[in-house]
């Protein structure tokens, strides 16, 4: 965690906007956070929300994160999650899963259920990981995995059934396509999407010099859609899918929204929960 960069961004942006109350959110693995940093998040940086990712229980977490110094920060991260929520920072725990760590993620949900306090400052959700290659391998277990994880989150009380099995209308593809959506890398470079951070051509500036490559931004904020989207009944809830997949560079294999292939089953599950919840 480069605290100098966070200092610079939060102070400079508030100064530029002439508003000391501007709040920030950030994404972190949570490993380098400590009490002093949490104090700064509140008193200096005005960080209201943070997203922390977990990839499994302790052993699987260490295997997947593969920290350069070989430490396993699992217990530190859990402690930090609790401490941030205790200090009034909205902490969203994202569980990264795929077919290879499904069982472990289900065990992690049980562990978190017994361990995490229930407070409005703490939420847990899951995200199905996808590859960064254009070569799409058909993951036939994806639907089963998704339902298993969503149901586990419901059973643990981290999600209500209506939140777990919902479709929402969107106004834009994602924050990468919004003109005011930026990703700041740990060394201060500016991108539109984390999937593109390996591509020097996708960099459009840095926090010191500002925007220097407007054409890189325009490619992401271009409102045109692919032909197939115009005929797609899911357009209102998808708005064109993942923009990163539209580039010729191998950013990602993901195209449409993740539940597209099992929308009927998702809605069936929702209706079942509603039926069971309604008074007889
Ligand atoms: S689901 Fe796929 S085809 Fe339909 S709007 Fe989204 S990206 Fe386009
Ligand atoms: S990966 Fe796709 S959906 Fe996610 S921020 Fe990037 S462009 Fe948007």
Image: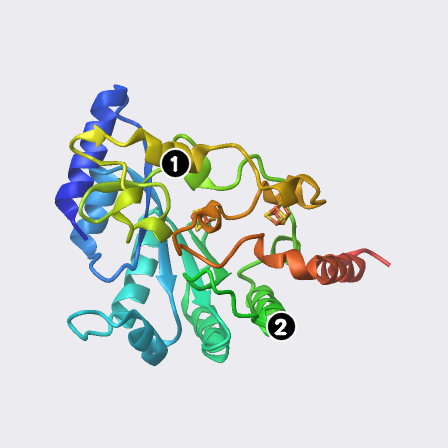
- Determine the residue located farthest toward the top in the rendered image: 18
Where residue 1 appears, as percent x and y from the top left, is: 19, 53
N-terminal of the pair, mark 1 or mark 2, is: 2
Between residues 154 and 212, which one lies in front from this camera angle? 212
State the SS at label 2: helix
Between residues 262 and 152, which one lies in front from this camera angle? 262
Q: Is residue 124 visible?
A: yes
State the SS at label 1: loop
Check disc 1 and report the residue beneath it: 181
Between residues 64 and 275, which one lies in front from this camera angle? 64
Q: Give the CA distance from mark 1 to mark 2.
A: 33 Å
- For the C terminus, the image quarter is bottom right
Check disc 2 and report the residue beneath it: 144
Where residue 272 appears, as percent x and y from the top left, is: 77, 62
Horizontally, residue 106 falls left or right of residue 278, namely left
Q: How many marks?
A: 2
Where residue 178 appears, as percent x and y from the top left, is: 44, 34
Q: Is residue 127 above or below residue 197?
A: below
Q: Is residue 141 above or below residue 118?
A: below
Residue in the image at 57% along x and 38% along y:
225
Question: Mark 1 CB in 8 Å range of ligand 2?
Answer: yes
Q: Is residue 184 visible?
A: no
Horizontally, residue 15 falls left or right of residue 110, namely left
- Determine the residue located farthest toward the right in the rendered image: 280
Where residue 115 appears, as percent x and y from the top left, is: 41, 70
Graded by Cα atoms within 10 Å as few (under 14), some (14 to 19) or many (20 or more), the crowding at tag 2 reads few
| Quarter location, residue 45 | top left
Residue in the image at 47% along x and 33% along y:
222
- Determine the residue located farthest toward the left in the rendered image: 4
Residue in the image at 34% along x and 31% along y:
215
């Amino acid at each position: 965690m480069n605290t100098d960069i966070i200092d610079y961004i939060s102070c400079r942006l508030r100064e530029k906007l002439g508003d000391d109350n501007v709040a920030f959110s950030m994404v972190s693995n949570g490993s380098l956070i400590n009490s002093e940093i949490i104090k700064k998040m509140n008193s200096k940086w005005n960080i209201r929300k943070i997203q922390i990712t977990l990839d499994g229980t302790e052993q699987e977490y260490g295997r997947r994160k593969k920290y350069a110094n070989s430490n396993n920060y699992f217990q530190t991260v859990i402690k930090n999650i609790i401490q941030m929520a205790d200090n009034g920072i909205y902490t969203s725990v994202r569980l990264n899963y795929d077919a290879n760590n499904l069982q472990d993620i289900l065990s992690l949900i049980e562990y978190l259920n017994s361990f995490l306090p229930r407070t409005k400052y703490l939420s847990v959700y899951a995200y199905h990981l996808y590859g960064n290659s254009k070569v799409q391998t058909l993951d036939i277990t994806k639907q089963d995995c998704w339902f298993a994880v969503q149901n586990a989150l419901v059973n643990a009380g981290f999600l209500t059934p209506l939140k777990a099995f919902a479709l929402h209308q969107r106004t834009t593809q994602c924050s990468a396509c919004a003109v005011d959506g930026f990703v700041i890398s740990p060394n201060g470079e500016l991108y539109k999407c984390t999937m593109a951070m390996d591509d020097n051509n996708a960099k459009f500036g840095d926090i010191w010099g500002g925007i220097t490559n407007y054409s890189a931004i325009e490619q992401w904020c271009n409102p045109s859609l692919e032909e197939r989207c115009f005929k797609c009944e899911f357009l209102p809830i998808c708005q064109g899918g993942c923009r990163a997949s539209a580039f010729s560079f191998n950013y990602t294999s993901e195209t449409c929204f993740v539940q597209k292939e099992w929308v009927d089953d998702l809605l069936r599950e929702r209706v079942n929960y509603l039926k069971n919840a309604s008074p007889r």
